[in-house]
Image (tube, rainbow, N blue to C red):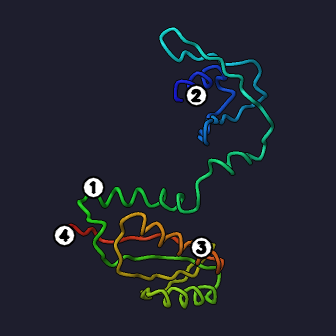
Amino acid sequence: MAKIEDAIEKTLGPRALWVGHVTEADATVSAFYATSAIEGSVKVKTGLLKTETFPPESRPDPGWTWFGHHLAPTPLELVAHRNATLIETLEEHGDRSDVARPVDFAADFPTPEARTRFEEAVRTEGYAIDGTSDDDADLPHRLLFSKTIPVAPPGIDEVCLRLTELAESFGGDFDGWACPVVTAG
């Protein structure tokens, strides 16, 4: 598949952007977004003496609807991507992500009332409240909270997705997490 996509990309040049491919049953669809309709066909060398010709199909999609439906990451994948750098840093320091440890979290809210409602919700889910602060930011009312849990994916990703959705339900923003490195069980 990579040979075909590379050949198409070379043929289309700078007027197109490869965004991915989807394989379903007996067909693979490679998606490119181009500045104009694609004319003609693309020839790809598929063997020592064999060449295949592929007629590209082109249709308008200015809102990237196809991409959003077929290739856009899920909310959990987005959270996992945001967590990846921190997980990698912990691993580089010999962390045992499967071992529970205190994990600090933060979330910011537009009003003290929204922060209080979020605080009540996370308390019922077993989080300890570590403090609050207020400043001049867009979401000036911060809540600091913690829970002793392992940080191994996908568990930490699911926790962060839950906290993201919960904070958003109160007009807030989940700001992330931090924890110490744990090298022994």
Amino acid type assigned to the residue bearing label 2 in the image: Glu
Mark 4 residue type = Ala
> In the shown orientation, is residue 71 left or right of residue 102?
right
Identify residue for label 3.
Answer: 165
Residue 134 in the image: state x and y as whole percent: 55, 83
**Which is more N-terminal, label 1 or label 4?**
1
For marks 4 and 3, the one nearer the N-term is 3
Above-or-below relation of 36 to 62: above
Q: CA distance from mark 4 to mark 1?
A: 15 Å
| Residue visible at 65% across and 78% down in the picture | 169
Which structural element holds mark 3? helix
Marks 2 and 3 sit apart, C-alpha to C-alpha, by: 37 Å
For residue 58, side relative to residue 146 (left or right): right
Q: Which residue is mark 1?
A: 92
Element class at badge 4: loop
Location of residue 141 (image quadrant)? bottom right
Q: Is residue 104 above or below residue 122?
A: above
Residue picked out by circle 2: 5
Q: Nearer the viewer, mark 4 or mark 1?
A: 4
Of all residues, the one furthest to the top in this rendering is 49
Label 1, residues with CA under 10 Å away: few <14, some 14-19, many ≥20: few
Look at the image and tell me whether residue 136 can be seen.
no
Residue type, numbered disc 3: Glu
Task: Say which quadrant the C terminus sits in.
Answer: bottom left
The quarter of the displayed image where residue 129 is located: bottom left
Nearest the eye: 69 or 104 = 69
Residue 5 in sight in this render: yes
Residue at x 68% of width, y 46% of height: 67
Give coordinates of residue 37: x percent, y percent: 79, 28
Q: Label 1 sits on what residue type?
A: Glu
Report the residue marked by disc 4. Answer: 184
